[in-house]
Every structure is written in C-alpha cells, then in structure tokens.
Image: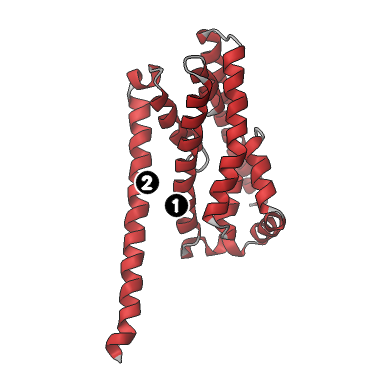
Amino acid sequence: MNKQSLKPDSDNHVKSSMKTVFIILQILFVAAVFILWFTSESLRESRSLWILAVCAVPANFVTGVIPYDPAVIFFARYHAIFPVVGVGVVSILLVEGINYSILKTVLNARLFTKVHDHRLTKKLIRLFDRRPFPALLAAGFLPLPFYPFRLLVALSGYPFYEYILSVLISRTPRLLLLVLLGHTVEIPDAVFYGIYIGMVVAVYLSAVISSIRKKTVGARDG
C-alpha cells in the first residue's frame, strides 16, 4: 500500500526533473545563440538564410531585443520569395514553442503567485479569454508588440497547439508581404543599416524612458 502511494509521487518527481532539465537546455540554447550573434562579426555580415533563422531567436525570444521585420526585408533582397518566408516562419514557430514552454513554467511558479492574483492581471486574462484566437491573429499579423500576448498565453493556460497555429496563420502572410517589399523596393545598404539601428535605439530608448518614469512616480508616491 505504501509502495503504491509512493509511486505517483516518484513519477511526478521524475517528470518535474525532466521538465526542469528541458527548460534549462532551452535557456542555454537561447543564451548560446545570443552570445554567438553578438560576438561574431562574420555571422552578422553573412547573407545566408540560416543567419535569418538565427536572428529569429534574439528578435522573438520573450520580449525580443532586435526587430525581425527589417531582417526579413533585408534577406529578401538576396533570395527567392518562398525560401525566405519558409525559413522565417519555421524559425519563428520554433522560438515561440520555446517561449511557450519557458514562460508557462516560469509564470506558473510560486514566485509569481502575486502576479496571477493581481487585479489587473485577472482583468487582462478575462479580456483575452473572450476572443483569444482572433486576438493572437491580429497581434501576429499587425506591427504590434507581441510579447504581451506571449505573457497572456502563458498566464491564461492557452493551449499550445492553438497558439502555434495562430502564429503560423498570422505570421505567414505578414512575412510574405515583407519579402515582397524587399523584392520591390530598392534600399541602399547604408540607408537600411541606418533605419535598422534607429529602430533598435528607439526600442531601447522607450524602455529607458518608461523605466525612468516608473522610478519618478514611485519616488513621488513614496
């Protein structure tokens, strides 16, 4: 009797350990891609499509640290339409699978209980749960920040396969339009790099300004 009662606990412990190892491996993989990308100049200057696949990690992992759309437009200038779209879509799907796994595990940990119980979080989840699939389709197709929806998916327990399907349906036409843009509009490399750097600076500058504002409001309230 005791052995039978202990077996489920043992099985759960093994599953939990395997899940933890899987999450750690995913984090290490993402970290390796980040390090490789930011330390290799030849990697960043390559025109190979596998570089576009690598770009998908820093661009789409959780909040994303670089814009991905300009990279798609850039590589579209050197390759046929459908290979670029295919590589872009598959890469994004893989990264979103990692996002789902990591965020669901992390945000459902006891450390984030207060986040779940917060009134604003519950309100956002209720709004998202009304029309989750159309919301994901719109967010994936339109040029909107997508990371809030990644968080809502994890917090609400939205099904994995439906999430991946929404990403596939929304990102495919978006990438197709970007690739067509890259094929039809001639942009000199210098101008393209300037626009890309400007977008990155704008993203980080807005984050810094937001952080400063929060600190200022917190100091006033204190």
* Image color mode: secondary structure
Q: Compared with residue 102, is residue 13 higher up or lower down, i.e. above or below?
A: below
Residue marked by disc 1: 102
Q: Residue at x 49, y 56 (%)?
A: 104
Q: Position of residue 121 (x, y in %)?
A: 64, 58
| Element assignment for label 1 | helix
Q: Position of residue 44 (x, y in %)?
A: 39, 21
Q: Position of residue 196 (x, y in %)?
A: 54, 20
| Left/right of residue 60 with respect to residue 54 in the rendered view | right
State which quadrant residue 10 falls in. bottom left
Mark 2 residue type: Ile
Mark 1 residue type: Ile
Look at the numbered discs 2 and 1 and tell me whether their residues touch, using CB distance below 8 Å: yes
Residue marked by disc 2: 27
Q: Residue at x 45, y 36 (%)?
A: 91
Q: Nearer the viewer, residue 185 or 81?
A: 81
Q: Nearer the viewer, residue 15 or 176?
A: 176
